[in-house]
Image: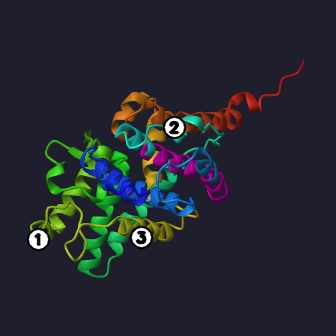
């Protein structure tokens, strides 16, 4: 039986994909971390000593930010846990290592609501400025994409892999398939978003007859994540917005603005598809930051002059 680390890593990745039913992108990320680990250590066979792991940890601490380091450690640690579970190794070397280190808290970057309004308004105006039917058609699709992205807070990968059957405009719902093959149903609560989606389906009726995907490009293939990023950059420039905006920032803004509107965090957790409330709680920090800004800068007491 082969016992090289490379062989065992490939076995582990197959296990993650087939038996644990993890998302392909997650497994791909594990593979990148594991192959890098193999390239940085001086052996391709078991056992892997505590000293080798300590040298590896020292190397990646010099190369990456804490958040990336934490993810890479989690990938390697999960692999060794698998080896221990399968009784390929008797002793997990990670059991003897203190992995705790301080990780600076990074708040999610959000888009101010007035900027989102300017952004969406710009796309609608672009429709009126279209010089050809094809240009108008593309903008109609882009409006539907951006409206749905912000209306649901879904991940860009979830949006690009939506199928036509996942969208029910009669009942105003969308079925989203998230990480780990988990699905969630979201209500589309805004009539303008529904109109945008109906208009898109009307304009693209011929293309949609030839595919199962909801959002398609001119070749009738599903819209790629890179295409959506390009789309956002294009309209950010057209709107004259001096801010780098990513698809995930719409998700962050969706969550933060709902929290600021008083929506219970557990509802937001379900809408975002988070397995743990801890993941969602980071938005409370953003909300508190906004609260501090309001109270320090706009509270009426700040403008009062009181004499003793």
Crowding near the residue tagged with mark 3, few <14, some 14–19, many ≥20 C-alpha atoms within 10 Å: few
Tell me residue 276's x, y (percent).
Answer: 41, 32
Q: Which residues are magenta?
A: 56-79
Quadrant for residue 240, please give it: bottom right
Q: Residue at x 25, y 79 (%)?
A: 134
The residue sitting at the front extreme is 1
Residue that badge 1 annotates: 206
| Mark pair 3, 2: CA separation | 27 Å
Q: What SS does tag 2 mark? A: helix
Q: Is residue 66 magenta?
A: yes
The residue sitting at the left extreme is 209
Q: Relative to 273, does residue 245 appear above or below in the rendering?
A: below
Observer-nearest of 25 and 48: 48
Residue that badge 2 annotates: 283
Q: Main secondary structure of the magenta part?
A: helix
Crowding near the residue tagged with mark 1, few <14, some 14–19, many ≥20 C-alpha atoms within 10 Å: few
| Horizontal side of residue 175 vs 122, given as left or right | left
């Amino acid at each position: 039986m082969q016992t090289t680390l490379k062989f065992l890593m490939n076995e582990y990745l197959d296990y993650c994909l087939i038996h644990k039913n993890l998302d392909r992108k997650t497994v791909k990320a594990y593979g990148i971390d594991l192959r890098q680990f193999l390239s940085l250590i001086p052996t391709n066979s078991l056992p892997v000593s505590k000293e080798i792991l300590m040298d590896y940890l020292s190397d990646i601490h010099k190369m990456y930010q804490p958040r990336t380091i934490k993810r890479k450690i989690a990938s390697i640690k999960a692999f060794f846990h698998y080896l221990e579970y399968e009784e390929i190794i008797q002793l997990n070397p990670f059991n003897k290592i203190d992995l705790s280190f301080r990780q600076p808290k990074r708040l999610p970057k959000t888009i101010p609501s007035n900027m989102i309004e300017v952004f969406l308004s710009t796309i609608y105006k672009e429709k009126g400025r279209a010089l050809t039917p094809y240009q108008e058609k593309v903008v109609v699709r882009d409006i539907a994409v951006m409206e749905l992205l912000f209306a649901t807070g879904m991940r860009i990968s979830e949006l690009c892999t939506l199928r036509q059957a996942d969208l029910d405009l009669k009942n105003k719902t969308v079925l989203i398939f998230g990480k780990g093959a988990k699905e969630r149903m979201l209500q589309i609560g805004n009539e303008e978003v529904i109109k945008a989606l109906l208009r898109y389906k009307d304009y693209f009726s011929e293309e949609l007859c030839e595919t199962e995907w909801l959002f398609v490009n001119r070749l009738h293939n599903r819209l790629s994540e890179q295409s959506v990023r390009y789309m956002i950059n294009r309209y950010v420039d057209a709107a004259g917005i001096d801010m780098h905006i990513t698809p995930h920032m719409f998700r962050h803004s969706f969550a933060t603005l709902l929290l600021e509107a008083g929506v219970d965090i557990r509802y937001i957790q379900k809408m975002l598809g988070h397995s743990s409330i801890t993941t969602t709680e980071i938005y409370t920090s953003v909300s508190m930051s906004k609260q501090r800004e309001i109270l320090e800068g706009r509270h009426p007491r700040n403008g009062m002059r009181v004499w003793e």
